[in-house]
Amino acid sequence: MDGFGRALALLPSELRRAAMSLGPAEQKAAEELRLRAGYEPTFLTPEGERSFCPGMKLTVKDLESVLEIATGASVHSSADSVRRGFITVKGGCRIGLCGTAVMGERGIAGIKELSSVAIRIPREMPGCANGIYHELIRGGFLSTIIISPPGAGKTTLLRELVRLLSLQGIRVSLADERGEVAAVWKGMPQFDVGPHTDILTGAPKAESAILLLRAMNPQIIALDEITAPEDVLACGSAANCGVKLLATAHCDSVADLRNRALYRELLDAGVFSRAILIRKENGKRIYEIEGLT
């Protein structure tokens, strides 16, 4: 089953039939299914959102049905993940959740009364890095950060680079906080990330990176989306121990990367030696490598 099919399997029957009516090109272009109470269901493509069932108004029950299907009617078993605003299910689909936050002593303790659901459609793209991989490893791999605006394919490229590096016998430790990169299910990765990759799923990236550094003797640590000061500190610790890094960040350009205080600290410290910029041209992803030192 492809990524679109995995996403369809999470929908209640009426919604599933409506989404199945999309043509092959639309299914291939779809990146997310977006469901909002009181509005028509849509699918997200690089060009924006489009309805896949005009005239239908979704209800809160429709959204709750998605969560029940995703958790096997055992929502309480995924309570910790729901508290963080998403769950990742077998096959790598990540389901983002919005609604009314239930507050506890340590912050958000849960989400009730769902108002929006976003189903991220996972896709593997073997070969997508072929045009840049040999340049990345020429003379030895250097710490690299992948940058682009949201939705441009950073996670997909990260996954493929991890796979290729691992195939070369390089020990890669993957901090897969949201389970999107390897989609580990009951201990088994659903996506191919290579035979020499060790995966820690579900923990914050900063804590994961330190644990992997101490426990798994990695040559490269890979992590998706540097977003917090704690992530920056973990990257610095890994670099100081001689471990290379492969990471992603939401930025429009290298100049944008340098202008943001969070990332500027990493660049000033020389943690990353180069960046891969992803841009889209005529519907295709273009990868450009740029030095940072």
Image (cartoon, grey):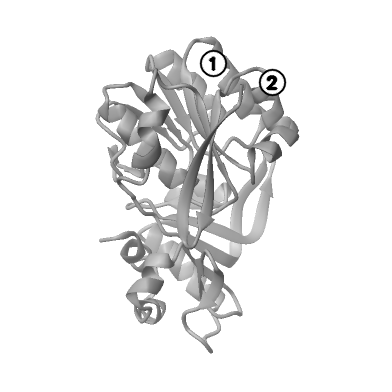
Can residue 179 be seen here? The reply is no
What residue would you read off at disc 1? Answer: 239
Which disc number belongs to residue 268? 2
Tag 1 and tag 2, C-beta contact below 8 Å: no
Q: Residue furthest bottom?
A: 55
Percent position of residue 287, x then y: 48, 44
Location of the C terminus by quadrant is: top right
Q: Position of residue 183 (x, y in %)?
A: 36, 45
For badge 2, the amino acid type reads Asp
The location of residue 273, given as percent across then percent down, is: 55, 23
Q: CA distance from mark 1 to mark 2?
A: 13 Å
Pointer 2 local density, CA inside 10 Å: few below 14, some 14–19, many at least 20: few
Q: Nearer the viewer, residue 212 or 79?
A: 212
Q: Tell me if 68 is positioned left or right of 84 in this view.
A: left
Residue 234 sits above or below residue 49 on the image: above
| In the depicted structure, whether residue 246 falls above or below residue 125 | above
Residue 239 x %, y %:
54, 15
Q: In this view of the protein, can residue 3 be seen by the observer?
A: yes
Q: Secondary structure at mark 2?
A: helix
